[in-house]
Amino acid sequence: VAPSHVPPTVSDFSPSTIGDFVQFRDVYKSYGENLVVMDHMNLDMRADDRLVIIGPSGSGKSSLLRVMMGLEGVQGGQIGFQGKPYIHGADSGRSKRIDAKLQKQIGMVFQHYTLFPHLSVLSNLILAPVKVGGISKAEATERARVYLARLGLESKLHAYPSQLSGGQKQRVAIARALMLEPKLMLFDEVTSALDPEMVIEVQNVMLQLAEQKMAMIIVTHDMHFARDIATRVVFCASGKIVEQGAPADMFKCPKEARTREFLEKVL
Ligand code: ADP
Ligand code: MG
């Protein structure tokens, strides 16, 4: 067995039986000296997977998504995306992003909608595609109309964020992420700040994406939604994947005591 500090070579990101779409290999991340949020983590995902990450507050779920998005570095290990090296750890914690092109193929939506308040819905949507996606304003506008219509928001094209409900803002945030035509979408507790009646409209949009076979990594505390949308549920605690499996198995008969304990509290 090779010592763990030897980074895997490119060929280690070849297709595996578990998943070649996303591969975490021995990923290590800590904040400061003591707070380890990824303790030599390995994770595999296929292009037709919808992973739902569950775990106690502070277990590193958001960190995992931010790392995958390329917003934060890791100190060790490697992450592959679509069979290619994507990120590798560096002692400084500012991991080297091997491939910025791959990063552009990931979209992310956060708990607190991050729309620009001074821009209309349309301007929010076309900003990145025109600036970094290199498409014309006319083409981006056409694309914005298509996505807004798909998400039931065609009448809000010229509205400003302050004129939208929380659920509508989150749907616009999802539409904006879709504008760059990502291959993978990351959702970090996107319904946690919403009133109950708005939760469903946002979850329905995500279920619609699932039907269209969008690859997704979703962090949620809503176990019923997890059951509906996940192909696989991943339970994380203390920087490790404690247990993972199909939603029916995980929720009905979790194998690990820690998983059972957690599920008893949230189910
Ligand atoms: P979760 O989303 O599961 O609640 P997070 O990834 O947000 O977990 O955080 C994991 C742990 O790391 C928490 O203890 C949190 O306080 C800490 N943490 C998160 N971001 C930072 C940061 N930028 N600097 C220092 N500590 C952080
Ligand atoms: Mg979080």
Image (cartoon, grey):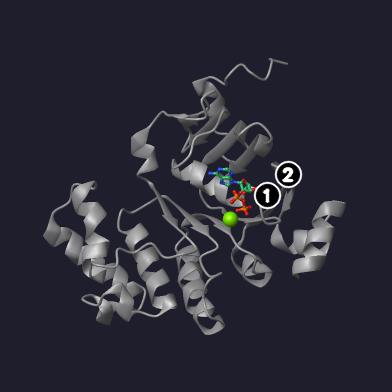
Tag 1: residue type? Ser
Q: Quadrant of residue 118?
A: bottom left
Q: Position of residue 198 (x, y in %)?
A: 49, 80
Q: What label sits on residue 238 in the rendered view?
A: 2
176 and 36: which one is in front? 36
Residue at x 67%, y 20% (from the top left corner): 4
Q: What label sits on residue 172 in the rendered view?
A: none
Q: Position of residue 145 (x, y in %)?
A: 23, 70
Question: Judging from the image, what secondary structure is the residue with disc 2 in?
Answer: loop
Q: How many marks?
A: 2
**Quarter that holds the N terminus:** top right
Residue at x 53%, y 41% (from the top left corner): 22
Please, is residue 27 above or below residue 169 in the view?
Answer: above
Q: Is residue 240 visible?
A: yes
Please, is residue 235 above or below residue 196 in the view?
Answer: above
Residue at x 48%, y 67% (from the top left corner): 206
Question: Judging from the image, what secondary structure is the residue with disc 1 in?
Answer: loop
Contact (CB < 8 A) between labels 1 and 2? yes
Q: Give me the C-alpha separation between circle 1 and circle 2.
A: 6 Å
Q: Is residue 18 visible?
A: no
Residue at x 53%, y 27% (from the top left corner): 89
Judge: label 1 CB < 8 Å from ligand 1. yes
Q: Position of residue 194 (x, y in %)?
A: 51, 75
Tag 2: residue type? Ser
Q: Position of residue 82 (x, y in %)?
A: 46, 38
